[in-house]
Amino acid sequence: MFDKLDDILVRLEEILNELNEPTVANDAARFQKLMKEQSDLQPIAAAYSEYKECKQTVEDSLAMLEEESDEEMREMLKEELSQAKKRIEELEQELKILLLPKDPNDDKNVIVEIRAGAGGDEAALFAAEIYRMYVKYAESQNWRTEMLTLNENGIGGFKEVTFMIYGQGAYSKLKYESGVHRVQRVQETESGGRIHTSTITVAIMPEAEEIDFQLDLNDCKFDVFRASGNGGQCVNTTDSAVRLTHIPTGIVISCQDEKSQLKNKDKALKILRSRLYDMELQKRHDEEAEARRSQVGTGDRSEKIRTYNFPQGRVTYHRIKLTLHKLDSVLNGDLTEVLDNLIAADQAAKLANMKDQ
């Protein structure tokens, strides 16, 4: 398993030497590429260097134990040997995870789509809460968000919302959020105190740049119309809203949040490009695609990946069978614990698959 680790150390040394060359700084693209590669290899090299040191400690301790007769010294060597062996086991696991094939989209920004499913207005209100949850989490990571499209229901809920999250590694952490999220609570309008169940769907897509997906504008039809809703003087008096139809797939995207028709057009194209790129990724990875489709589904109550139970103050993550009694904290954007658990579960599954191969 570790046969390529020495090659990684050699490659890292080569990168460091290249970065010290005066000409590299003048080539921005090359410099950025080398820095990215260095960043990817550095954790592996650090873990492997410590691994080799621990292996050497084991050899040295065993050799000294054979010659040492002083009981106190022997106890110290045995303790040192035990600690080194334990650390070797930990480092082996760390290195296995670090050597797993990396998702090429992990460093990308993401487009998040949230849609109200079963439950009417209550589902729309919950969609708005989940939108705010992701925005707060993004803020905690020092990421930036940008609203792309919004369809409100008139009482503070979102029938549908699409927004961008800009941040290093955003997709690597949030890609596990795709699926149906279920809420169980007493509605504000419910006088009998009965608990109702509603659902929303969340789709997380990596931002597709032009280098990732070439979009043929001849396949696109643009219509302009007058924006509706609150938007100030300009928005509602000019044909600034844009409806984009992708003829081959039938995908329709409407953007009207900006006063500028050009900005709305750019946003629509950004969403379309990411949706089509996401569809292409699904075709490339049939197994993952099937899993993702079954996760997102139609918003039906039976296809759930997570349940937010307000009466019990709990959140249950059905994929990994994890329940946390910290509902308020989660809705305030505290997603670190669960995302770490989801990442660990995914890594464990990949390691198990590698053993089976």
Image (cartoon, helix red, strand yellow):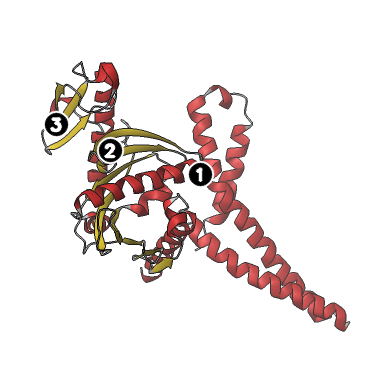
Q: Tell me the residue that label 1 is attached to.
A: 140
Of callouts 1 and 3, the N-terminal one: 1
Residue type of the residue flagged with mark 1:
Ser
Task: Please state which of residues 228 and 211 is positioned toward the viewer in this rendering.
Answer: 228
Camera-side mark, 1 or 3: 1
Task: Please state which of residues 29 and 244 is positioned toward the viewer in this rendering.
Answer: 244
Residue type of the residue flagged with mark 2:
Ser
Q: Secondary structure at mark 2?
A: helix
* Gap in angstroms between the C-alphas marked 2 and 3: 14 Å
x, y percentage for residue 315? 39, 62
Q: Residue at x 42, y 60 (%)?
A: 342
In this view of the protein, can residue 102 be seen by the observer?
A: no
* Gap in angstroms between the C-alphas marked 1 and 3: 36 Å
x, y percentage for residue 229? 23, 28
x, y percentage for residue 284? 25, 49
In this view of the protein, can residue 224 be seen by the observer?
A: yes
Q: Residues within 10 Å of mark 1 (few under 14, many from 20)?
A: few
Of callouts 2 and 3, the N-terminal one: 3
Q: Tell me the residue that label 3 is attached to.
A: 245
- Above or below residue 227? Residue 162 is below
* Gap in angstroms between the C-alphas marked 2 and 1: 25 Å
Camera-side mark, 2 or 1: 1
Residue type of the residue flagged with mark 3:
Thr
x, y percentage for residue 295? 25, 58
- Above or below residue 196? Residue 121 is above
Q: Residue at x 47, y 55 (%)?
A: 329
Task: Please state which of residues 218 and 18 is positioned toward the viewer in this rendering.
Answer: 218
Q: Tell me the residue that label 2 is attached to.
A: 274
Q: Residue at x 11, y 36 (%)?
A: 248
